[in-house]
Image: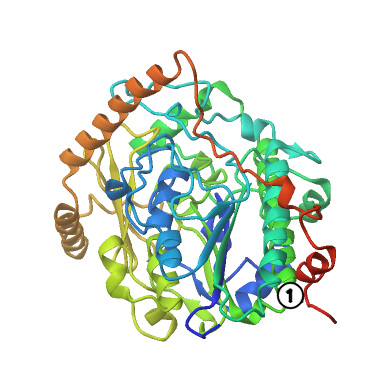
Amino acid sequence: MTASKPNILIIMVDQLNGKLFPDGPAEWLHAPHLKALARRSARFRNNYTSSPLCAPARASFMAGQLPSRTRVYDNAAEYVSSIPTYAHHLRRAGYYTALSGKMHFVGPDQLHGFEERLTTDIYPADFGWTPDYRKPGERIDWWYHNMGSVTGAGVAEITNQMEYDDEVAFLANQKLYQLSRENDDEGRRPWCLTASFTHPHDPYVARRKFWDLYNDCEHLMPEVGMLDEQDPHAERILHSCDYASFDITEENVRRSRQAYFANISYLDEKVGELVDTLTRTRMLDDTIILFCSDHGDMLGERGLWFKMNFFEGSARVPLMVGGPGVTPGLHLAPSSNLDVLPTLCDLAGISMDAVMPWTDGESLVPVINGEARTAPVLMEYAAEASYAPIVGIREGKWKYVHCAIDPEQLYDLDADPLELTNLAASDNSVIKATLDAFRQMRETRWDMAAFDAAVRESQARRWVVYEALRNGAYYPWDHQPLQKASERYMRNHMNLDNLEESKRYPRGE
């Protein structure tokens, strides 16, 4: 294998708050494997999701394109097959590509460039979770988030989510063993394996051995509790989560955060298993490991939970990249999950000329090598709890948020990291000039009326199609992972001696 074609292991988690990763995991987190990974990685403190919701964030992550370009606006918007993803680019360059776990693809294409999916997805692939801008304020009770995740926080030894992530880790490790058998073969294909977990996404339930790690934790209450006055979108989020129907106690908050931290430690154990397998199969030195999350979780800050907004807890996410050709170190310039696709392709030696027309991001390799990154980070949100599209820009110390139906927001994150002072109404000349510059940037980048119309048209189409497809015979789009049992282990069309030798790694030692 040439140095320009390293193996790639992407470890993706779900709803991990980037504020907990100031330089790798916070010191007080029990995450030894992630801390070890951080020490050998380039770490991006101010990295952001493209959209703070699962499906749009993941579609953007895969393609390096904003939701307005992928048209994956919400958790039930189709991800069309013609959009190039990092799996397509790498596969085109000769890589074997596989996914173990969640990517929340909606629509009949459940691969999007992956040659193989080892598991099904944890969430549905159809249009059933389509929000409706024609009915602002409507709660769709059977699938909208509610605060039951908070009031029900606690300990369990198995849940739906644990069952899923246990399977994701097992099959990812099994695939690494399979790939190791080919590791010494001349002419073998380099590989890109994505292991994508659903934790620490709520519900906030954890196994006892991880829960007990945080019994004396000093971080079980948020820095900022419920605010007396919320911005209009935060009010909409509280309504969409049916907050008024629940009595959220301090104990509920503490237990929810304890379970969340515990599940970071649960994931840390999975990361340790994967890195250990790479080490024992002699592939670690040839493998780039990228650790990331789709979006964050507010964890009770400002009284908000889950995501769906551009505040730091929801929008800021960890990003660490380590391996051959990557100099470890901390990078403070704002970056984006949109940058992952061009970064992976750059590290794999793929020509940027073949990649850049298909991405809104930029490679972080120059940043890793000491160059400055000055491009602003762009974000979009047009899903549940929004009545019109919302856009955000992070540039330097500033964060700007715009929605056509809401007052603007501008925060100085250096002076106000908790985002408690909206400067958009300030009379200060510097603030006014900064706000005008962001408005011009926004007007250049987005036609908000056209964006709104595109979202509404997409929702309306999907409501028609979903209702039609649920009548009569129903053919699900959910991925059905198939295994050829007649080609597994020992069968009578195989030579036993050849089989045993080929399945062993290292061979003949």
Query: Which residue position holds label 1?
Result: 281
Measured as percent of width and height from the top left, residue 495 is found at 80, 63
Q: Is residue 80 above or below residue 477?
A: below
Using the image, determine if residue 466 lies above or below residue 183. above
- Residue at 52% x, 81% y: name it: 329
Q: In the figure, residue 413 lies in which quadrant?
A: bottom left
Q: Horizontal placement of 244 versus 168: left or right?
A: left
Residue at point 56% right, 43% down?
300
Instruction: Identify the image quadrant of residue 339.
Output: bottom left
Q: Foreground: 273 or 398?
A: 273
Residue 5: image x %, image y %? 50, 79
Q: Is residue 443 left or right of residue 123?
A: left
Q: Nearer the viewer, residue 339 or 442?
A: 339
Q: Residue at x 59, y 70 (%)?
A: 24
Can you see residue 414?
A: no
Crowd rating for badge 1 (residues with CA inside 10 Å; few <14, some 14–19, many 20+):
some
Q: Secondary structure at mark 1?
A: loop
Q: Viewer-proximal residue, 322 or 148?
A: 322
Q: Of all residues shown, which one is farthest toward the top?
A: 472
Circle 1: residue type:
Thr
Residue in front for this viewpoint, 284 or 21: 284
- Quadrant where the C terminus lies? bottom right
Q: Residue at x 55, y 49 (%)?
A: 15
Q: Position of residue 208 (x, y in %)?
A: 82, 46
| Residue 318 visible in image | yes
